[in-house]
Image (spheres, grey):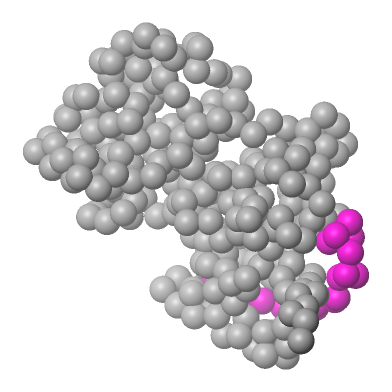
């Protein structure tokens, strides 16, 4: 008896929102970001095995293995309101029409569909880099997100590109982004020989808001309150400070809103159980590149 590998067939789902209560603003922390964060979690919960997704101002796209349409739509219509229960009725986003269609069983066709989904923000003029959009799994695939929804290992068996760099170059080489493709940013590093004191480090030069912004982007967490109470977001932010040589416990304490003693305690915990912060450092590098800054100017 031969062990044959079953071919995976995929679907492209599109859903539209009816009368969003706020005008969508793609900037981090803009009005409506909490509601769109809830939508993103709803989509992730329903399409756990997706290989591509993007959330736009008035619609979403998801590419996933084939599944029964009526049950998937029913789960979506239950999940989206459930995630928004804590919001005021005027702040909730309603789901309208949902449709799905099969994707031809071809690596080339599937890759084109994934590229089409990832470039939605570029076609709308929100960004010139598909990595510059928060609500896309292309950021997850490229290593810019903590606890990614989709990884390149999940996509690789279904496309022709063998490496992450080749995949990103294929996705981003487009007139709506850059014909030559956009770069994959290595994790931010302080330049060699940079002074360790906070006044001369990247934190002092750019301001602590950049660190907070990069951490929020890597977590897709916009509620600032999450960084003011005990939990992973605050621990992660403290880890970023210590990695960037912020040795002054009072500076860290001010940023994560704890006492200097609490900051020293966080540092001790992180030494015992290190936290992976590479995605945050990539988000920080992306933020600096967007502002025309680089590591060499931080010393």
Is residue 10 positioned above or below 268 on the image? below
Q: Observer-nearest residue: 192 or 12?
A: 192
What residue appears at the point 77 percent right and 61 percent down from the top-left corner?
158
The part of the image, by quadrant, that contains residue 243 is top left
Q: Is residue 245 left or right of residue 207?
A: left
Q: Is there any visible trace of residue 106 in the rendered image?
A: yes
Return the residue found at the far left: 261
Q: Quadrant of residue 93?
A: bottom right
Please give left or right for residue 232 compared with residue 260 in the image: right
Query: Which percent across, then down, holds residue 289?
Result: 59, 25
Please say whether residue 129 is one of the residues in the magenta stretch.
no
From the viewer's side, name the closer residue of 165 and 90: 165
216 in relation to 33, above or below: above
**Residue 240 horizontal side relative to residue 279, left or right:** left
80 and 130: which is toward the camera: 130
Where does the image place residue 63, in percent across and percent down from the top left? 74, 67
Please name the residue shown 78% across and 33% down the image.
181
Q: Name the image quarter holding residue 24.
A: bottom right
| Residue 101 included in the magenta stretch of the image | yes
What segment carries the magenta color?
92-110
x%, y% of residue 79? 55, 80
Q: Compared with residue 96, is residue 155 higher up or lower down, i.e. above or below? A: above
Q: Could you say where residue 222 lies in the image, as x and y percent from the top left?
A: 45, 52
| Residue drawn at (49%, 80%) of the image | 82
Q: Is residue 112 left or right of residue 236?
A: right
Compare residues 170 and 246 and report the one nearer the observer: 170
């Amino acid at each position: 008896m031969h062990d044959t590998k079953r071919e995976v067939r995929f679907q492209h789902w599109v859903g539209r929102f009816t009368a969003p209560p706020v005008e969508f603003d793609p900037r981090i922390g803009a009005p409506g970001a909490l509601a769109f964060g809830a939508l993103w979690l709803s989509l992730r919960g329903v399409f756990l095995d997706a290989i591509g997704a993007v959330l736009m101002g008035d619609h979403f796209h998801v590419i996933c293995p084939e599944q029964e349409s009526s049950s998937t739509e029913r789960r979506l219509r239950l999940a989206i309101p459930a995630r928004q229960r804590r919001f005021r009725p005027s702040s909730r986003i309603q789901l309208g029409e949902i449709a799905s269609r099969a994707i031809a069983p071809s690596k080339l066709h599937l890759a084109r569909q994934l590229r089409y989904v990832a470039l939605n923000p570029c076609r709308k003029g929100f960004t010139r880099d598909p990595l510059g959009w928060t609500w896309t799994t292309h950021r997850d695939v490229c290593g810019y997100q903590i606890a990614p929804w989709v990884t390149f290992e999940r996509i690789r068996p279904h496309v022709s590109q063998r490496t992450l760099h080749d995949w990103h170059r294929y996705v981003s080489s487009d007139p709506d982004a850059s014909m030559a493709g956009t770069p994959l940013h290595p994790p931010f590093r302080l330049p060699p020989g940079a002074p360790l004191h906070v006044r001369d480090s990247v934190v002092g030069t750019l301001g602590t808001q950049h660190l907070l912004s990069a951490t929020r982007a890597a977590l897709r967490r916009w509620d600032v309150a999450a960084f003011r109470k005990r939990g992973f977001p605050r621990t992660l932010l403290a880890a970023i400070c210590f990695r960037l040589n912020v040795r002054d416990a009072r500076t860290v304490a001010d940023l994560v809103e704890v006492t200097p003693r609490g900051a020293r305690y966080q540092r001790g915990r992180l030494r015992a159980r290190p936290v992976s912060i590479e995605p945050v450092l990539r988000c920080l590098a992306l933020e600096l590149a967007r502002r025309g800054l680089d590591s060499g100017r931080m010393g």
